[in-house]
Amino acid sequence: MGITCPIVSGSGGGNGIADYNDTSTSSNAIALVKDTWTTVPNDGAGAFTNLNYLPKGVTQLVDTNTGAFDFSELSLGDNCFIRNDISVNPNTNNALLELRYKLGVGAGEYTLESIIGRLDSGSGKDYRYSLVPDMIYMGDSNTKDNPIVLQIKLSTDGHFTNAGSAIGVVAR
């Protein structure tokens, strides 16, 4: 028996998905400086970008000029499940990888942070993180109407590539 999710339309218009594949880092990995938050770009220009199933009335979920998530066309109470696909290559073994989302603006800015894990199988090799979704809900206009920036931090120098982000929207 399947799970059904009721669609309650707000300005966003219901459930949907989008997959934004990045090409900006595929041939030029981005350097990671030890213990420094680095913004993850996403140009949405990858061959597997799929915008065919956006929620009705929604034109984008990522601003491909900045790489930031753009949930301004959604409704308050909607949930977004984001599955990022990032490969990190540390210069030193046992590096710690962290991920965060910067949300809101001004005095209302806040972060949601997570420790992804310790990269302890050796340095100079790619560690891929691609299957764990994060949930962000549109609890207020500060979250919904402002860019949401994805960043990573490594406890040592290294570099990373971004394959992209798949986003599922569940309307309230």
Image (spheres, grey):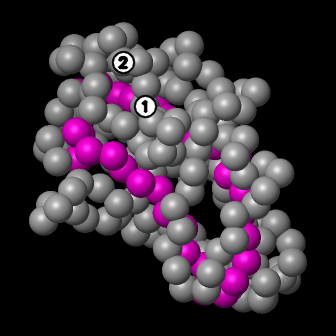
Rendered residue at 42%/42% (across/down): 69
- The location of residue 36, given as percent across then percent down, is 52, 80
Q: Horizontally, is 118 left or right of 170 in the view?
A: right
Q: Horizontally, is 100 left or right of 46 in the view?
A: left
| Front residue of 28 and 116 | 28
Q: What's the residue type where badge 1 is placed?
A: Leu
Q: Is residue 147 magenta?
A: yes
Q: What's the residue type where badge 2 is placed?
A: Val
| Front residue of 52 and 34 | 34
- The location of residue 124, given as percent across then percent down, is 86, 78
Q: Secondary structure at mark 2?
A: loop
Q: Main secondary structure of the magenta part?
A: strand
- The location of residue 95, given as percent across then percent down, is 68, 85
Rendered residue at 33%/46% (across/down): 147
List the residue tagged with mark 1: 61
Q: Horizontally, is 46 left or right of 83 in the view?
A: right
Q: Please tell me the numbered disc located at residue 58.
A: 2
The residue range painted magenta reads 143-172
